[in-house]
Amino acid sequence: MKFTAIKDAPMIRVLGRTTQEREPLTLFWTGSGLEFGIRAEELWVEFLSDYSLYESWISIQINGSFISRQMLSKGINKICIFRGMNPEKIKQVRIIKETQAMSGDEECLLQFIGFYTDGELLPALERTMKIEWIGDSITSGEGVIGSIEEEDWIPMIFSAFRNYAIIASDALDAEYRIISQSGWGVLSGWDNNPYCALPDYYEQVCGLLSGERNEVLGAKRKYDFSLWQPDFVIVNLGTNDSVAFHQPEWKEEETGKTWKQRINLKGQFEPEDIKRFVQKVIEFLITLRKCNAKAEIIWAYGMIDSTMLHPIYEAVEKYRTNTGDLKVHLLILPEMSKEGIGARNHPGELSHKKTAKIITEYIQSLIERKKIT
């Protein structure tokens, strides 16, 4: 079988935000991976995996169907994607990273080196649109896989393949990118940590990763948005901001400074903290428009919690009024039902499918509205 390095295979579509380096190709985010056609009887992929706490998992799809899912062991290894298939038929292959960028493990790494095959690599099928998804644990697919009894926070229970972002992207025939991090929010993380605010890292390749190796690989670089412009940007943030109001204050060890989203004596969220949240949403919408000039931006919220719905609505309306930008929308998502709960009390696959359907139909309605006008 012949070896082809990733750098020598320009026909391969790279999924997910990364750098321009292809020797090897570093995959940072949830759902990042490779998509391509191939005419062959057998195919193997060579990769480099590393971790200290949280290993990477991948899933493999052939001709749009799920084939396998597995954990990747440390080191340089090869795995078989398929063998014994009709060598004359063209197969469409997608290999994706099931797990998110692990901000809590600076050793976590996944790189693709190349392919071994007896056939010919071909371009991936063209997609009709591009969608970027931005979110927290829901968008990272936490709890989509695994039984309802599972409470361990481990990579095994994350699944990009089964989350609403990829389900909806496939339904819309869209190329996608996912920017998400479990426990993070707009203003702070679930524990009031202000450094876990996803908008602060949006303009970097994958700036929430730490460690010297990630910096060398380009995670902290300013991202070049001209390389990939989405038609739609879907934001699903706010759930962890709501949780933070019910958590103890967060203290920075080095300075002793504390942060807390407060509940007042009336049992209500402190208005000043809500005001800060609204302002941060507006600022993020401004950033999103600067980086994605022509995209329809949809803030979709409500799968686990709807507490921040009114502040998000207020922020979207203020942004639209102040800027005249009517290509920004708010979409209310269905709260997960008892039957839709997955692992770690997160939305399961049923909830993700319902959400994907609603988002798909909403995007289709926006497309139809454009045609009419």
Image (cartoon, helix red, strand yellow):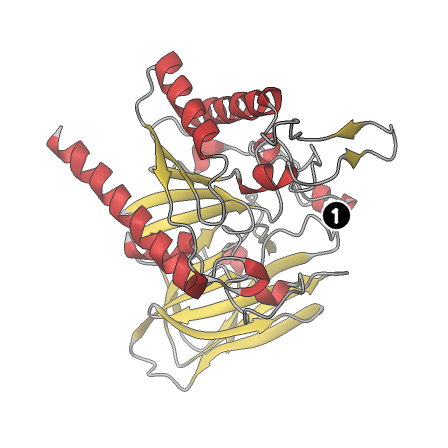
- The picture places residue 278, in percent across and down from the top left corner, at 51, 24
Q: Residue at x 71, y 68 (%)?
A: 75
The answer, for residue 17, to whether it is visible in the render is no
- For disc 1, the marked residue is 213
Q: Dot 1, crowdedness within 10 Å: few (<14), some or many (≥20)?
A: some
Q: Residue at x 40, y 37 (%)?
A: 233
Task: Check the image and name the residue furthest to the front.
Answer: 266
Q: Amino acid at mark 1?
A: Arg
Q: Residue at x 55, y 20 (%)?
A: 275
Please tell me how many numbered marks the rendered image carries: 1
The image shows residue 364, relative to residue 144, as above or below, that is: above
- The picture places residue 309, in percent across and down from the top left corner, at 44, 34
- The picture places residue 119, in percent across and down from the top left corner, at 40, 75
Quadrant holding the C terminus: top left
- Quarter of the figure with residue 205: top right
- The picture places residue 363, in percent across and down from the top left corner, at 27, 42
